[in-house]
Amino acid sequence: MTDKPSFQDRLVGAGFGAGWAIVPRLPERLTAGAFQAVADRLWRRRGGSVRRLETNLARVKGASPDDPAIRELSRAGMRSYFRYFHEIFRLPSMPADEIVSRMHVTGDQQIYDNLARGRGVVLALPHMGNWDQAGAWFAATGHPFTTVAERLRPESLFHRYTAFREGLGMEVLPLTGGDGHTFGTLAQRLRAGGTVALPAERDLTAKGVEVQFFGSATRMPAGPALLAVHTGAALIPAILYFQGSDWGLQFHEEIAVPSEGTRKERAAAVTQDLATVFEKGIAEHPEDWHMLQRLWLDDLEPRR
């Protein structure tokens, strides 16, 4: 049985519904200014999410969370985060040619080469920039793909997000609460020469692979590496960021799967290589890394 949504859950769901219904009907400059004003207000209040963002950014920069430069970087981070929300509300009404022309992409030829040979591709990305915009670009260029979505609360919000992403051309599978065959479905898509795109730097299962990330231990999802190991698909990291009023998307070289070791050992080595690529991309665009949650193991609260 699904828990009855709280008043706050219902309010969040209604807010997102209103965003998709109202924001595209208003002048973009007006709505962009409003979202930035909300970001600045929350930044000034320095609530728990902002302080967590600053702690995470301090890890990236090798600085103290109290460093004034980190405080300033967190303001840019909050503005980037709220820019993402502003853009997703406008995205369904954005013409496909605008989505394509404003996305500045490097390294994508390796994707097309693999797909042309019938080899599946796993795109692994951190929570950066506007990943939905990047997905819309990929679908608009004739490349539908499959992804996995965290089951949000309230349930109505999860369904709204799923419908939004499916409307952009994605196939969306639930991380939890589905038919229990999500990994098998992803593997099937890859063996058929398709593309799978997965967020890959935050483990939501507590069963991820432990890696070193900016000098400390964290866990990252095993899924992208295991899919590459199981299916032979190409694992390609993607870094997303905002480039002025447009968007940047950089595909790094394929991460090679070791030929020796158990599947678990090979998946662990691949995940560490993936973390190293993410380090580089996040360090180059720290303000566009939207990590407002605990990530490193020594920051996590003990489980009861």
Image: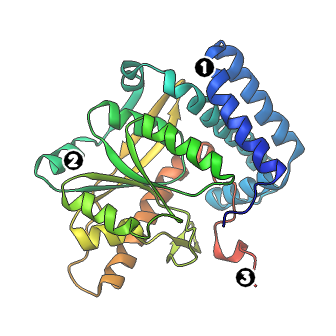
Tag 2 secondary structure:
helix
User: In the rendering, at what x and y percent does residue 168 appear?
Assistant: 42, 34
Q: Residue at x 67, y 63 (%)?
A: 2
User: In the rendering, at what x and y percent does residue 227 appear?
Assistant: 31, 68
Left-right relation of 302 to 21: right
- Tag 3: residue type? Arg
Q: Tell me, what colour scheme is on the image?
A: rainbow
- Tag 2: residue type? Gln
Which residue is tagged 2? Answer: 110
Residue 67 seen: no
User: In the rendering, at what x and y percent does residue 169 appear?
Assistant: 37, 37
- Tag 1: residue type? Pro
Left-right relation of 103 to 208: left
Left-right relation of 12 to 46: left
Which residue is tagged 3? Answer: 303
Q: Closer to the N terminus: mark 1 or mark 3? A: 1
Rendered image quadrant of residue 258:
bottom left
